[in-house]
Amino acid sequence: MKQDTSEMLRSKNFKWSKIFSGFNAAKTKEEKERQIMSGLPGNVPYESDMIKEWQPPFLFYKFFIYCIVMMILILASSYLYGFGDMLLVSVIPYMIPLIMLIFIWELNIPRNISILDVFYIAAFSGIICFMVIFFISDITGMDYNDVSSFTMPLLSEISQLLLICIFLRKKSRGYGLNGVLIGAAVGAGYSILKTASDLFYVAEYIGMLDGVMGIVLVRIIMVLGGNIVWMAAVGGALALAKGKEPLKGRHLGNSLFIICLTGTYLIAVLWDYDLTDLFVRFWDNDVAVSLYTFLYVYQGKYIILTIISWALLLFIARKGIEQAVEISEQARADKRKWESKIAANYAGRAEIFGISGIHGGKKFVCSNQSIVFGRDASCSVKYAGDTNGISSIHCEIKKQGEDYVLIDRNSSYGTFWKNGEKLEAGRAYVLNDGAEFYLASEENTYKVSVSKNNNNALDANMQYGRRTNEIDGIEESGQNVYIACAIVLAVMFAALFATSGGAAQMFNEQIASESAGEQGQSYYGAWQCDGRFNIKNILLNSIDNVAVLGDIAIFKESMADGITFTQDGMAYCTINGRAIDYAKFECSVVDDHTLHLQWEYDGFELTWGMFTENVSDETGFDVRYEVDGDTMYLNFAGQDILLYK
């Protein structure tokens, strides 16, 4: 049965627990269909009815159950049939973002954005954000994977904000909850692609599902407090600032919006920023070590930032709900006034015209109120106190059901029809259009004009107000703008990438390295291979320190596609020409065909209760090599690698 939510959303009764109430209650097929059709043509409410027709979220819970089942099936398919890695990358990254999107979509009380629009925004935004970010990274030389960068979170947030502005620019999307939903969709698109990209590389590096599932679960859970929540808060704040106006530059100066934008940026920076170097300075302090253990070993940093993120989002969403209630109540009040006005125009009424006597030529109207004839001061049609034949309360005309009736009120001289027939006192006689009657004598004659209720016309005019996806006047749909933006960005990206000189720069760096190598021994310079080799596994197979294994194994690059040997005795494993930060070795010559690579990991002392562990390790490799012109054969810790200059 449809739940009445009008009182639930009012400030004095509002509680988030009520919003989640009944999410697992049984729903009829009609209720499910009505919910999933929200936002499509014919399923958009009037502003006056949006609170009454809205139902608390429940579809997200059904989808959550489906996702759990899918997760189990993916694991089973991997262990039984070996195709789980494909599903890991192609299915799992979408699960949590879609559950969150469906919940926020159901929370959109105006119901003016369909789930199809949400998916469209998410898909479009994810692709565009990645294009913009990677393009700018390419032409500026910024490292996209640099977790200590303050610039990359800013670039990511600004890219998503521009997309929010595009999708929120229309006047009809003037509700705070519209902004929350659009922001969440933009954030989800970026989050899905980023998670899929990360999981693809993790699955490729490790190669086995059972070795990557722990990392997968951590990354999926981290989505709960990440980009979707941040952009939903930013979008909601911008929509509240914009209201029913077209988006303008001054809206970006709104204080609430600036607070949300700044706050989410700082959260994003802290989310990826590694504070390990800060804690190393206080390695001998038990409090600092305990704090580090909570923040990083037990993921306390992400727990705290997730709580802060959701607190900010729920604050913005609460304001959006209050705005929706206020708009709905104002629209309902306007609708009541309109209905009263329309009902008066189309309701039936009786018009009484004086034919003779002191009221000759006058007109009296009876709609819902009765008309009383007589000498009493309270009468509607009043006679002088000394008028012969007229009683104090002589007769009355009133509405009875759909008819108007004439009743003699036990007058002394009686009430008569035009033909002289006297009315029985107290009996109601139906008045037909054109009927004539007189009081006591024909000197006091009246004629009646009766019109019945025009229910068809009344029903046709009772719908008042605008739907939640409408505005006063005409507004373009804006689809051409979105398509144009996509084309312009794609063309700009292709043109600037072609002229950015990125490839030429990499080529020149390689030539310079080769020139340097020719000046020294034959193995000097930059060497690349056609595929990739797993530098992480080469290291991890030689490390017996659990803390070092944990620090290296989870969120760092593991595949390399080249090695650069320098004349100052260093070897750098590289990927796409970029040195992998932790895969740097001290290089020394053993003989003409053997190099020794020494690797050292510096850490700090970590206290676990009564035990103190030195978080550091080192290992060495004797690497066999053969150089033949521009080709090098390398046996790296048992792994054969063919490299080219």
Image (cartoon, rainbow, N blue to C red):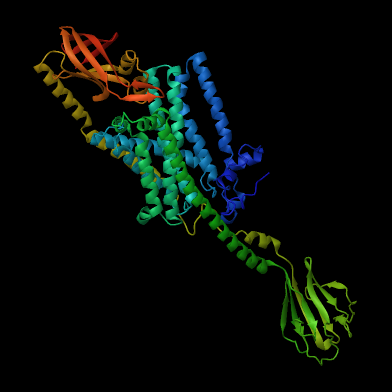
> Closer to the camera, 296 or 196?
296
Residue projecting furthest to the left: 519
Rendered image quadrant of residue 531: top left
Rendered image quadrant of residue 645: top left
* 150, above or below 613, in the image: below
> Closer to the camera, 533 or 447?
533
Quarter of the rendering occupied by the N terminus: top right
* 374, above or below 281, in the image: below
**Which x, y percent locates residue 468?**
53, 53
Q: Give the side of residue 267 with respect to residue 62, left or right.
A: left
- Count of numbered circles in the view: 0
State whether residue 478 appears in this view.
no
Q: Give the side of residue 381 with respect to residue 318, left or right.
A: right
Q: Write the residue at 48% across / 48% down.
A: 315
> Closer to the camera, 520 or 584?
584
> Closer to the camera, 505 or 154?
154
